[in-house]
Amino acid sequence: MTRTPVDRALRPRSIAVVGVSATPGSAGRNALNNLVAGGYDGDIHLVSRSGVEIDGRTSVSSVADLPEGVDLAILAVPAAAILETVQACAARRVGVGIIFASGFAELGEAGKAAQDALVEAAEAGGMRLIGPNCLGYRNYVRPMYVGFSGGMTPTLPPSQGQAVAVLTQSGGMMAHLTLALTTRHLPLSYGVSTGNEASLGLEDFLADFADDEATRSVIVFAEQIRRPSDFLAAVSACRDKGKAVVLMHPGRSERAQEAAQSHSGAMAGNYAAMRTLVSHAGAVIVETLEELVDVAEILARTGPPSGGVGIVTTSGAFCGIALDYCDTMGLDVPRLAPATLEGLAAILPAYAQPSNPLDLTTQPQREPDLLGRGLQAVLDDPAIGSVVVAITPGGPGQAVKYFDGLQPALSDAKKPVSLAIMGDGSPLAPEFLERVRDARIAFTRSPERALRAQAAAMEFGRNVERARKAGVSGEPTPSVTLSAADPVLPEHRAKQLLADLGVRIPPGGLARTADEAVGVAGRIGYPVALKAQAADLPHKSDVGGVALSIETEADLRTAWDRMTADVGRARPEMVLDGLLVERMGARGLEMILAARRDPDWGVILVIGLGGVWTETMKDFRILPADLAEADIAEEILRLRAATLLTGGRGSTVKDHHAVAAVAARLGRFMLSNPSIGEIEINPLVVHAEGEGVVALDALVFAATGG
């Protein structure tokens, strides 16, 4: 069986250290020491121009003297000698080379050209590269450290089934995350930094981790995802194997994108499209380093929760704070079932009110096991998917008693439980910390962090479930091809396409003369709208190309003459297809619906309320194109202005299910027609529940390069 380059890098049977010297602290000497100290038990070959012997290991003076087919070459040579060394390794059919040296694509165009030359030289011999500008990596399953600084981070044996792989481009982030996970006593399987990713990248290692038996979840810190389709496939593979991927990807701001370019030599892509489609593929995306570790811990220990969060505390004040915080995050805090309330009433003091959040009052000071009984009751409620226990520690001995009271419920918990001990950095007894470590539960000093992590874990579970339901099945969609010669469908043609998709449009027709316009109006009835039509006229109103509420034939002829004159003066070079005559319809709620093809990530849907809601308040949802219709409907109700759809402020309930149906059709169409770059319906008028929607204006654009 042919081994993959990543397998040869992570699990090499033979390693060559090229550029080794006897000088203590040199990159080559450190790399050799790390291999030996890390426990690597395969063949080690040394290459040194001086033919030095180190610790009884002889060296050869040239790469050409290496045996053919070495799995991994550690290139501990200066940047100026890298190209020659890669060429020599490729000639000896080395599988993978790792380059520590910097000074390549991260420095700009000249550096990128030098890096491209490395790739070309490597590929000539079937060799792949890790780096350059790379700190190295660690295999904790079969102990091995490939790097030039530090030593192996101590960790628990990965055989315990909770091992986390850490995957970054930044060596600094790899070091931070491995240390943070080790502090929480989570076992590690791998820690990998990929640097500039001249050849092998995040996508390749993530695909390997999907199949790795020791890895249960993966933390990814990505400054740039260079091969989006491969990354999505790798995330999906992890999802299919029941493995969580927790991703942090800076790049929402322009300055963050500039920082990514200067650090890793690549521009950031479309962050919104990335976030939407990577989440849909099966990753959970977080926004802080704390969340990255907190969420990974929950998912590694117990997997994603299914249901809302339960909150157990000894502070009535915290109940209100927690509800506000959960509301801000969109974290569901379900009401407890009647049977749960009845059971809690039987164990609580008479003055305590059973609810969620559950305030156990100060009674646990005298009765510590009440904490465990209260936690167990909340865990047993069918609506609860996870629980956050937020309590103050009391004195050192009291904190131990509290934990012992919780222990029976913690030991049997089948749902994620986070323990948040309030009091910020106040000291905790060593006996308490030892109990927490042995219990292997998520522990923090911040209830807010615990709730935010549970919210992200729940979002992950929801996304995984949605991905299982998603697909492009449904009624057949029309086939349309646009090209550079026909890059835009004007409104009248775009609307005909929508009609073919089953989307309702106003009755009307295209007229090329005033007499034809009068004929169309006579057939559909007044009042009518009149709109100029040309592929090169997306903003008709800017040139006087729109007239509304025309009541009579005389008014229509006047509007025709005025419009053709105004458009002719504004755009004398343009030839109109004609003027579109449409029946004015009933008023409704105006929304915007678009399906767009991101050139890197693929097709997304954009749904929002019209006018100020989308343009100023940025109130819109970005969704995967293959999301199930019911899930699209659910997302529409997550708009901040959703009360306008649900009957708030005295308005009628609107047909948001019809909006979801149109969005699902557009998504299927875009996925089946790669030459289409964007379809925008603006506005889509939403009528009362059961009365559907009408597309009042639409444009269709060809894909870039289509």
Image: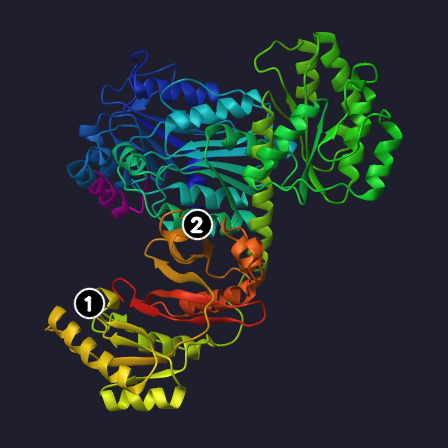
Give the crowd class for mark 2: few <14, some 14-19, many >=20 residues within 10 Å: some
User: Does the residue at mark 2 contact the one at mark 1 (Cβ under 8 Å)?
Assistant: no
Residue 119 part of the magenta-drawn span: yes
**Viewer-closest of 231 and 255:** 255
Quarter of the image where one finds residue 361? top right
Q: Is residue 306 magenta?
A: no
Report the magenta residues as a range: 115-129
Dominant SS of magenta comes to helix
Three-letter code, disc 2 = Asp
* For residue 161, side relative to residue 203 (left or right): right
Q: Is residue 459 above or below residue 699?
A: above
**Residue 437: image location, x then y, percent:** 66, 20
Mark 2 or mark 1, whichever is nearer to me: 1
Tell me if residue 481 can be seen.
no
Q: Which residue is mark 1?
A: 543
Q: How is the image coloured?
A: rainbow
Image quadrant in which you'd find residue 136: top left
Q: Which mark is residue 149?
A: none
Above or below 304: residue 525: below
The foreground one among 644 and 626 is 644
The image position of residue 246, as x and y in percent, is 51, 39
- 113 displayed left or right of 140: left
Figure disc tally? 2
Question: What residue lies at 62% left-to-right and 31% top-to-bottom?
Answer: 322
Tag shown at residue 619: 2
